[in-house]
Image (spheres, rainbow, N blue to C red):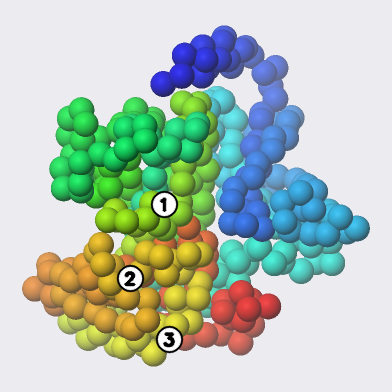
């Protein structure tokens, strides 16, 4: 790691120990117009008991690809509170939706429509678990730990690897894991991935809208932790061309009916519904996903829908244990690592449970 980065972090620590005289720092975070994450901090006079106690705020949407300069104010409406692992104490992270000044959701606010769908289908108790893959780059945009001007040995020893030369940046991964647990994110695991310097964290199971919320906050925490180590995080689905695995966001799904004995019937019905809207799903499953979904490197082709038991080369995989027991969940392997989680969970709920009159995920994207 850079000695400058370590020194600056050490210098900051003595200031973070200073008392705040009763103030609470609230880091407002939101998804911007290019599916990135932005944040800014507000001082509160006391700790809020719920999101209803938090004030709305605003920002310059012309600087985040969310509004024109002639009408640039975009409003932040708090929707969820998490503990702040960086400032500690009573300080908080506040997840927000973005709204225009005419009272309509901002065009980058896919959470609003997703929340309506999840609420309408609340009786189904739909659970999601997302496997977020990502790639580490150094400050010079080289894959972290790779030989300068060259390549490491071919894929094979890196997946769930242990030992020098097989894993890179485990310190960042461990720090992010602890930060996420402290914040209250339902992070359920981590592992090194197939391409060297590629990792994965899993979030879930989460019910309904909480999936998108927890994943968004977990991504924010990852960027913030990596920032302190001078490392960049890439969610691009094919960060390197050639014989290297891409990066996905495999999305595991189950409804209450699927989780009961005999649930395989409902899993198969859901998969048939997914097959009929394949291209609509691909359209919202991440930018540049065609570079990843080639039918190689543990992916299906973006051009055609497929499914199978224990088949990691299919669009949708039914785990072997689920096929054996006859109930459980299925895994949609098509989403890319750079998805908007509200789009993906929203369209899956819409497809397998049914649309509702005043919420249409695909229509909002096309608009």
Q: Which of marks 3 and 1 is in front?
A: 1
Mark 2 — residue? 294
Query: Residue 308 in the image: x percent, y percent?
Result: 19, 78
Left or right? Give the position of 227 relative to 352.
Answer: right
Dot 1: element:
loop
Query: Residue 212 in the image: x percent, y percent?
Result: 49, 59
Position of the C terminus by quadrant? bottom right
| Residue visible at 51% across and 72% down in the picture | 284
Q: Count the marks.
A: 3
Dot 3: element:
loop
Position of the N terminus by quadrant? top left
Mark 3 — residue? 277
* Whether label 2 touches label 3, CB < 8 Å: no
Which is nearer the N-term, disc 2 or disc 1?
A: 1
Crowd around label 1: few <14 · some 14–19 · many ≥20 (10 Å)? many
Which is nearer the N-term, disc 3 or disc 1?
A: 1
| Residue visible at 62% across and 57% down in the picture | 34
Mark 1 — residue? 239
Q: Is residue 291 above or below residue 169?
A: below
Q: Distance between the residues labelled 3 and 1?
A: 27 Å
């Amino acid at each position: 790691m850079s000695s400058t980065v370590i020194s600056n972090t050490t210098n900051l620590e003595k200031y973070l120990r200073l008392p705040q005289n009763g103030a609470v720092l609230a880091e407002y975070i939101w998804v911007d117009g290019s599916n990135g994450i932005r944040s800014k901090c507000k001082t509160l006079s006391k700790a809020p008991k719920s999101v209803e106690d938090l004030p709305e705020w605003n920002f310059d949407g012309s600087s985040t690809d969310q509004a024109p300069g002639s009408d640039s104010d975009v409003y932040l409406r708090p929707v969820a509170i998490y503990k702040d692992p960086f400032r500690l104490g009573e300080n908080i992270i506040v997840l927000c939706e973005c709204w225009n000044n005419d009272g309509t959701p901002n065009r980058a606010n896919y959470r609003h429509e997703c929340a309506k769908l999840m609420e309408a289908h609340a009786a189904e108790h739909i659970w999601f678990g997302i496997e977020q893959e990502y790639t580490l780059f150094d400050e010079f945009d080289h894959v972290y730990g790779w030989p300068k001007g060259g390549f490491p040995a071919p894929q094979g020893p890196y997946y769930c690897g242990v030992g020098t030369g097989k894993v890179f940046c485990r310190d960042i991964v461990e720090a992010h894991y602890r930060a996420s647990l402290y914040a209250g994110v339902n992070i359920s695991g981590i592992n090194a991935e197939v391409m060297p310097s590629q990792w994965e964290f899993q979030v879930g199971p989460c019910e309904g809208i909480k999936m998108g919320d927890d994943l968004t906050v977990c991504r924010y925490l990852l960027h913030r932790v990596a920032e302190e180590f001078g490392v960049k995080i890439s969610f691009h689905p094919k960060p390197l061309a050639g014989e290297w695995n891409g990066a996905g966001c495999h999305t595991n799904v189950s409804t209450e009916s699927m989780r009961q004995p005999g649930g395989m019937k409902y899993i198969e019905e859901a998969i048939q519904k997914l097959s009929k809207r394949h291209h609509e799903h691909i359209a919202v499953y991440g930018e540049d996903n065609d570079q990843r979904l080639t039918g190689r490197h543990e992916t299906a082709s973006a051009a055609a829908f497929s499914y199978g038991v224990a088949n990691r080369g299919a669009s949708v995989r039914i785990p072997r244990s689920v096929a054996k027991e006859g109930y459980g969940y299925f895994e949609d392997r098509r989403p890319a690592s750079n998805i908007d989680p509200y789009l993906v969970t929203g369209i899956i709920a819409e497809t397998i449970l049914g649309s509702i009159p005043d919420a249409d995920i695909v229509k909002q994207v096309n608009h």
